[in-house]
Image: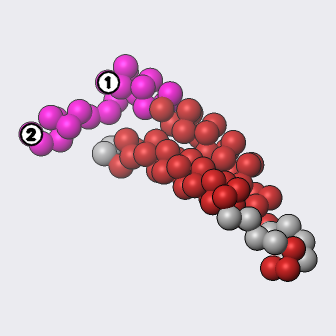
Amino acid sequence: MLYRNLIPLMFLLMIVEIGFRMIVGTLHPLGEEFYVRTPPGKIGNLPMALYSLAMFYLSCRNIAAANLKGQLASPRQLLE
């Protein structure tokens, strides 16, 4: 049950990582001499960011609902 609580953290780290990718791509863009077409990573940043935001929201909502129902153990219960 403890690892289920880490799923929102995983999606939050993905959002941060994609944000840094977008910032670095904006601050240090590669010129036309480095590639012929748009790199696939640049195209996939926005859909991946939207997917990560949606999954982060859903994972937080599911954990909050499980806590209300008493299905998840608290850290104190895990230590006992």
The part of the chain drawn in magenta is: 61-80
Q: Do we see residue 18 in this rendering?
A: no
Q: Earlier in the sequence, mark 1 or mark 2?
A: 1
The residue sitting at 90% across, 77% down in the picture is 36
Q: Residue at x 42, y 25 (%)?
A: 64
Report whether 56 appears left or right of 69.
right
Quadrant for the C terminus in the image: top left
Q: How far apart, in angstroms, are the residues tagged by discs 1 and 2?
A: 17 Å
Relative horizontal placement of residue 59, taking residue 19 as reference (left or right): left
Q: Position of residue 79 (x, y in %)?
A: 12, 42
In the figure, 27 relative to 51: above or below?
below
- Residue 30's x, y, as percent? 76, 70
Mark 2 highlights which residue? Answer: 80
Residue 65 within the segment the image draws in magenta: yes
The residue carrying pointer 1 sits among few (fewer than 14), some (14 to 19) or many (20 or more) residues within 10 Å by Cα, namely few
Image quarter of residue 63: top left
Q: How is the image coloured?
A: secondary structure
